[in-house]
Image (cartoon, rainbow, N blue to C red):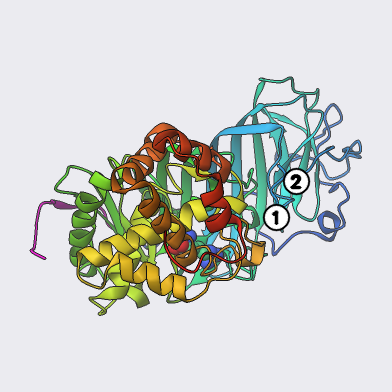
Amino acid sequence: MHRRNGYARRTVAMVCAVAVVAGCSSDAGVRSGPSADSRAGTLPTSTAAPGSSTTTPDGQPSTTVVPPTVPTPAADGVGDELFPSLGFTGIDVQHYDVVLSYDPSADTIAGSVAIDLQATAPLEVFSLDAVGLEVERVSIDGTDVAFEVGRDALVVQPIRPLNVGESAQVEVLYNAAPNAGAGVVGIPNGWFHSTGGSYVLNEPDGARTWMPCNDHPSDKATFTFDLTVPAGMAAVANGDFVSHDSSSAGERWVWAEAEPMATYLILLLTGDYVVSEATTSGGLPLINVTLSGDEDLLDEYVRITDEQLAFFEPFFGPYPLDRYGLAITDSFGGLAMETQGRSLFSRDDMVGQQGYIEHLLLAHELAHQWYGNAVTPARWIDIWLNESFATYAQWMWLEHVGFGTVDEFALDALRARVLGATGRPAAGDMFSFSTYDGGATVLHALRITVGDDAFFELLRGWVQDHIGQSKSTLDFIAFAQQVTGTDLAAFFDDWLFSENKPDDFP
Ligand code: ARG
Ligand code: ZN
């Protein structure tokens, strides 16, 4: 490989060391977790009920109001086979305005999330995914409404039912002490406390543990993040850098993600980070983030990313988002996540390795920007549409830089005799070998079956025709048959849906 310095580097914003009071600025204050009331699923007494609300002298809802009972929504969850409680069918979120103060010494957040949504069914009540949040107040279009906090949902009752197509802005004021737990899939996810700060890794269902949201990949939305952290700290999210200012409340950092994004792809870092901007030789804007002192790490990885973009685009089509970047945090090693428009890596995997693992991770997370981020799974059972494609891309890049060939990687994976149907994983197997390398063998078999031209036309067309949307495995199969003009039903039965894959490639 030759060195290419086709990008300019310029510092956008540096953390400044202004001595101000650390801590949360929200007047709501921070408590250490959900109240006994909310755990028990009864309506918290702090709820201001419509029509009967009174306020305290500081304008907060009175705690003496007896609110009406909130009926339980008829159907909870969007029908995700692996995570039945996730999402709510009758709402379509357009935008989240996330305002958070984080206190790293107490590991608590005080937040308000304003959600612009549209009703897709007549709604007497609706629910948002929320786990372990202490909800103070919920309003719709500025008026306090009744709500109830259950085990994994925040049930909200509009003053009058919403009609199909009607828009509303729901605002939730809350506190939380989020702590990434094992999660349903057995892999920790959610909000992680790190040395001097925090990071989130939400996939698949961690976002709901620190913000109320429609936590399902079928509902993508745009986001703004308005983050306040103690003096001297930085806070970084997805999208474009909007502003940074310091005040007695701390450092306030504002970011805006203008492209539709699933909640599992949120990037949120706090700590001693340096943010820098660059442009690839192809003209793509990059915003990179590293811990202060690690800035030099970036040069090599930005150079590799630049080459990977040039390598992938002929196969996958133009890079599908408005920007990219690398964020390197101090998480546990082995963590890498395709957070939208700015992938997240662990410094343990990136410092002083200069080889296989960095090439693999950089290629894998970059490829997810096409497969997973631009086009997102409709349900979690479609996870192979993310991981098998990113693994195949990773094999292609590793071959390009001389770490083996795609044929060898594919044969090794097939010989490992992957058990379990790649296209029908259980929740606990969604990040298994069967989804990653096992699924990449499905793509390799498809490539051999339809030929290189049709295969890459399919991969390009899949993103170009469905950008910004959430699509299922059945959508992919139908699209593959349409693009290749081939009946592929038996192929996908054998390779994707059977418990045992064929012994050999076609
Ligand atoms: N999508 C990530 C990747 O393939 C894996 C995330 C696994 N989830 C988790 N909570 N660790 O790179
Ligand atoms: Zn992946």
Q: Which mark is residue 133?
A: 1
Q: In this figure, which residue is indicated by the disc labeled 2?
A: 154
The answer to if 320 sits in the magenta stretch is no
Q: Position of residue 495 (x, y in %)?
A: 53, 57
User: What's the amino acid at mark 1?
Assistant: Leu
Left or right: residue 12 compared with residue 466: left
User: What's the amino acid at mark 2?
Assistant: Leu
Residue 20 visible in the picture: no
Left or right: residue 315 compared with residue 58: left
Label 2 secondary element: strand
Q: Position of residue 271 (x, y in %)?
A: 41, 65
If you read the primary sequence from the N terminus, does the residue marked by circle 2 or circle 1 appear first?
Answer: 1
Between 383 and 235, the residue placed more toward the observer is 383
User: Could you give the CA–CA distance between mark 2 and mark 1, rounded to whole angstroms?
Assistant: 9 Å
Q: Position of residue 120 (x, y in %)?
A: 68, 26
Which portion, as a residue range, is magenta?
Answer: 1-16
Q: What residue is drawn where x is 32% and y is 45%? A: 456
Q: Give the label, 2 or 1, closer to the camera.
A: 2
Q: What residue is drawn where x is 45% and y is 39%? A: 486
